[in-house]
Image: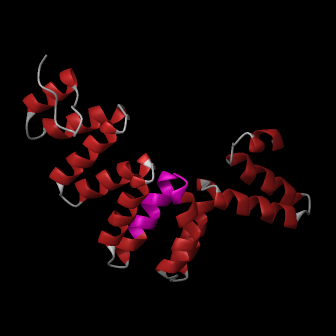
Amino acid sequence: MRRDIEAGNTSYLVILAGRLDKAGRADEAAELRQRALDAGEFLVLQPAIADLKETGASLEDFERLLRGPAEAGDLFSMQSLAAQFDEAGRGPEANQWLADMAKTGNLEALHVLAGRLEVANRGEEAQQVWRWILEAGNSAALENLAQRLEQTDPAAAESLRHYGIEPGGTTAAPW
């Protein structure tokens, strides 16, 4: 397990911590759980988030827990922290934080931002974000954008699928 942990498999941190607890090595187990938290391991983050919610923790408490893994690219952490901003009435601040992370190369932040914009019925802005994701080289965003376009303009969706986008994000003309 330790080899797998060193190779980046963070779920083994949780499993090994449980085994160390059973062996009476609580200090080592706690250290591994902290590493799992820092790595954004869902199996540790999810109960920690639930504990914070149960105790009525502040947004700053959620930030201490989630900002590191979120900024390292963990989608669950990004979504969870953005939701806490929403609950605190600071949703626009979450969107700006996601956009700022994207500017530093965190493309996962753009995916979260696009989803948030869609949920907020800000479809035009969401489509622009999907185009930025495509421009950054993530071709998986093409089908996401095409599916959204299909709802309002099936011809534009088909054109996007066939011809892609131009630099600047506009759908490419037929060639």
Left/right of residue 74 with respect to residue 129 in the rendered view: right
Left/right of residue 61 with respect to residue 79 in the rendered view: right
Give the residue furthest to the right: 24
Left/right of residue 95 with respect to residue 50 in the rendered view: left
When the figure is inspected, residue 107 is found, relative to residue 89, above or below; the finding is above
Q: Quadrant of the C terminus?
A: top left
When the figure is inspected, residue 16 is found, relative to residue 27, above or below; the finding is above
Q: Position of residue 97 (x, y in %)?
A: 39, 65
Residue at x-position 8% and y-position 36%: 153
In the rendered structure, does residue 73 fall within the stretch colored magenta? Answer: yes
Span shown in magenta: 70-83
Snapshot quadrant of residue 96 = bottom left
In the rendered structure, does residue 12 fall within the stretch colored magenta? Answer: no
When the figure is inspected, residue 106 is found, relative to residue 44, above or below; the finding is above
Snapshot quadrant of residue 9 = top right
Left/right of residue 110 with respect to residue 19 in the rendered view: left
